[in-house]
Amino acid sequence: MAKRSKAQTSSALPSREDLVAFIAKSPGKVGKREIAQAFNIKGGDRIWLKQMLKDLEIEGVVDRRGKRVHKAGQLPPMVMADIIKRDRDGELIAVPTEWDEEEHGAIPTIIILPARKPRPGMPVAGVGDRALLRVDPLKAGDIHRYVGRVTKILAKKQAQVLGIFRPLPDGGGRLIPVDKKAREQELQINPGDEAGAQDGDLIAASIVKHGRFGLPHAKVKERLGSVKSEKAVSLIAIHTHNIPKEFPKPVIDEAERAEHASMVGREDWREVPLVTIDPPDAKDHDDAVHAVRDENPGNEGGFIITVAIADVAAYVRPDSAMDREAQERGNSVYFPDRVVPMLPEKISNDLCSLRPHVPRPALAVRMVIGPDGRKKSHSFHRVMMRSAAKLSYSQAQTAIDGRTDDVTAPILDSILKPLWAAYACVKKARDIREPLYLDLPERKIVLKPDGTVDRVFVPERLEAHRLIEEFMILANVAAAEALEKAQSDLIYRVHDEPSLEKMRALSEVLASIGLKLPTQGALKPELFNRILRSVDGTEHQLFINEVVLRSQSQAEYSAENYGHFGLNLKRYAHFTSPIRRYADLIVHRALITALKLGKDGLSPDTTRAELIEISAKISAAERRAMAAERETIDRLIAHFLADRIGATFDGQISGVTKAGLFIKLNETGADGFVPAATIGDDFYRFDEKTHSMRGDYTGETYRLGDKVEVKLVEAAPVAGALRFELLTKGRFTGKAGGGKKGTKRPPRGAKKAAKAASDRRAPTRVKVKRRSRG
């Protein structure tokens, strides 16, 4: 604990209670500086304050996010939220957009918005809106109920609601929203407003009446087909998460008026043999690379690496219709059957796409790499380039491995081999830096022409992938360094170190398989890499990689820099994908302004407060996209397996809770659930420390990471849920599961009745946190 010296004791330092109360009540950013200013803490007393805050974090009293702190489990004073319904008293109810259930628990956190008399200029919110709220706990100590006030509406409610039609005997029917958050708010469809919808149809309806009380009335606008159709799956995710699908007419018109950028203010790089390397199905190409050995005698063994990025800022000007729409979307969203782009097709797939053999404007960074792989210097250039070739990852890799084709044969020695030699050089520095390395398979779904699932497979991880990733990381670091040197505000890509709570949970999991988490020294990615290496090739490899992933914080965008823990970098900004990420477009504009590369950069009037708001919006948009993509894959796989009820599969226990076991299938990577009531012929208790379920009578145990065989008993495609029956016997430890002394075998028929009750319940929706690419 933090102790006070005699000098400190004589000064008026705040108590623990004073610190916690200040952190809980303070609006906006709260960090060590703000606390020190509030309590006039100076000089050596700041060391006491730093230790006190660390003690409070260790005890779980406060949470830390970079340099910011707030009361543990409590919402910050300003929060982005979705308004989901009205309660019986007519007051609006909102839920936080960015609430992390894995970190703060799954208990719903709601914000009550009391009715207020409208005033001129006051934002008026409604059901379906996304808004920035100022919140306070409803009662002292209650971290799940808040009272809020709207300060700004960020997105108005959707004009249509997506749901499943259920007819009523006397005509008309009910719309059951596919959005789980809105399930309590069904819509009434009057006779004559069904538009021919049949029972089970997926429909889009518009709300025609939404009073303070009673069910809202809706009118069917479009029948999208049966919910059993795979083609409807991505539409469900798009609508559930309010992802803008159609571009407004002003945006389309503005894109159509755009003309090719000229050479004015640009360097002519059309003879530099840059190449694009992308997935084979990529439609837009926003990065190109080139490398040569450095001829400077002072850098013998070094390289010059060039990364050229599509100059989106030349076409999408600040505060234009396209810019406002791009900021609202935040990023492109990728589904197996479609892409919802951030920018209109003429911009993303034509004018900005670095097509081979045609001139394209770009913002390029030229980086000088030393023989040790470290970047010695960099410079940014606004250029006109012409891609020498369009390659896929496998095509480039195959050429390097000795099997060229008509495209790669002419450029193998002059372009591809220097790229691989430069990568071998920068890999030295990467290995010394040692970023977090997680070996988790990323499965890909391939669809048939009719939209049904053809197969699920794990793409091979190639050296070509790693080459492009490392070159992009170098360029992103250079962008952050250049803007910091110019003392320019920017949006960083940040990733906080794991919280103490998650580290304790990880330590318990490791202890259950006989591993110990080191507690000495600074927390660095290398610590996790040692753990991962220790289980490499063992039966625990997959689930320990999953557990380490879940222990990590989520990467986000921020106008405040607190580094990127996973990449082990002090400064990092996204620069390399402005076609599909709004953060990158902001960084491009900041570079154009800071380095005087044109007049279409970030406005000097852009404030830090604006960048903070943009960071919050695009971070939320990224999480929205990840959730939509994940849920779509879950639903598609559930569709894929729906006709295999009764089939058996090999898998691994990927999660253990009081309710039962989560299973990940080896074949497809699908996640499903085994209810505790259906396990074996015993009553099973959850052991939190060992992450296992143990039978009261037999001691039979199922542990996180165990390999099991399961039978599929139910698939719910709309929910993306699978329910399994466990076929594998557990391990026998010889210890009972913690029941009362003298526990007897369950009475005959008890487990059968429990299983029958479980069979009548809908399968549990599985939430799995996927790896972010940072």
Image (tube, grey):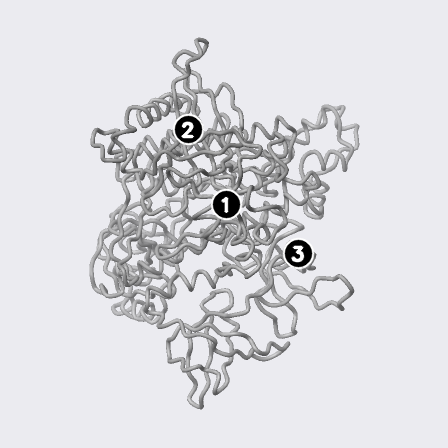
Q: Residue at x 62, y 26 (%)?
A: 485
Residue at image position (58%, 60%) is: 82
- The residue where tag 2 is placed is 271
SS class of the residue under badge 3? strand
Instruction: Tell me the CA gap for discs 2 and 3.
Output: 53 Å
Q: Which residue is mark 1?
A: 581
Q: Residues within 10 Å of mark 3 (few under 14, many from 20)?
A: many
Residue 517 appears in view: no
Q: Using the image, determine if residue 232 lies above or below residue 609.
A: below
Three-letter amino acid code of the residue under disc 3? Leu
Inter-mark Cα distance, 3 to 1: 25 Å
Give the residue type that dot 1 points to.
Answer: Arg
Q: Nearer the viewer, mark 3 or mark 1?
A: 1
Q: Nearer the viewer, residue 431 or 145?
A: 431
Front position in the image: 650 or 168: 168
Image quadrant in which the N terminus is located? top right
Residue 412, how many percent across, how many down?
A: 28, 27
Pointer 3: what residue? Answer: 133
Return the disc, 2 or 1, that comes first in the chain's sequence. Answer: 2
Residue 52: where, in percent of width, then height?
65, 33
Q: Label 1's element? A: loop
Do tag 2 and tag 1 residues touch (Cβ < 8 Å)? no
Q: Nearest the camera: 155 or 287?
A: 287
Number of dots carrying numbers: 3
